[in-house]
Amino acid sequence: MSTASRAADARPRAPRTSPAERAAQITAAATALALDEGLHALTLRAVAARAGVASSLVAHYAPSMEQLVAETFTAIVRTELAEVRAHAAAVREPSIRLRALLETLLDGSRDDVTGVWVDAWSIARRSAPLAAAVREQMTAWHAAVVDALRAAAPAATHARELDRIAAHVLAMVDGLNAHELVDYRAGGSGLALIAGMLERELSLPAGALTR
């Protein structure tokens, strides 16, 4: 054996990456890429380049790019919902908790996630896996808003009314945030717009959600 060969054998070898670690690496790369550039950017080559691996390795761990897009969307949106729920849960008074939930959705700090939502609604028209994921996450968000409304609303408010009002809130939040992405009426008070609607719908005193 040559001196060079013996020296090469003596060098410590890098630890092998386990399948679970490699899958997590690819998932993290896809998530970062989606947040930076949008769901449209999730191609086999782009994810591989972000992860620093060969395209064939991504194809091995994610044989369906449609499914990877759906899973990436789900991971991003679930994380956002968990963060927003935790932020609101830290507030004890129900009406202020509802306001805190609305504020964190409208403060512009989650524009990258809003972009992912907008991409998802567009791409899902031609992707059954993504459409199913979008419906599932919209349902989860709807339930979270209903919970916040139920705590702040008068006890006699019917469940069907809470369901309708939650749909109204989400439609307004999604629309306002999508408008902000293109600076349409940027700087407007979306919070005041939604809070005013909720005060009327829930029979709360004027200013209860805007003070």
Image (cartoon, rainbow, N blue to C red):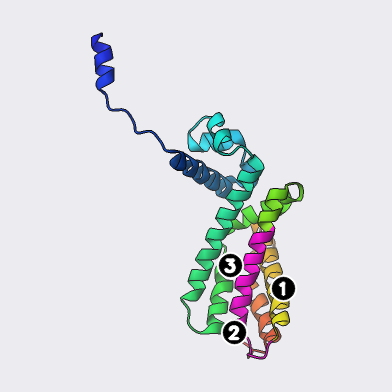
Q: Is residue 15 left or right of residue 150?
A: left
Q: Is residue 206 above or below residue 179?
A: below
Q: Is residue 147 above or below residue 47?
A: below
Q: Secondary structure at mark 3?
A: helix
Q: Is residue 3 left or right of residue 38?
A: left
Q: Who comes first in sequence, dot 3 or dot 2? A: 3
* Residue 200 on image: x %, y %: 70, 86
Residue 148 falls within the magenta-colored stretch = yes
Q: Give the CA distance from mark 3 to mark 1.
A: 15 Å
Q: Are marks 3 and 1 in contact (CB under 8 Å)?
A: no
Q: What residue does disc 1 label?
A: 168
Residue 105: give its label: 3
Residue depicted at 66% across the width and 76% down the height: 194
Q: Is residue 120 left or right of residue 6?
A: right
Residue 5: give its label: none
Q: Quadrant of residue 186?
A: bottom right
- The residue carrying pointer 3 sits among few (fewer than 14), some (14 to 19) or many (20 or more) residues within 10 Å by Cα, namely many
Q: Quadrant of residue 47?
A: top right
Question: How many numbered callouts?
Answer: 3
Residue 83 falls within the magenta-colored stretch = no
Q: Which stretch appears magenta?
A: 135-157
Q: Amino acid at mark 1?
A: His
The C terminus is located in which quarter?
bottom right
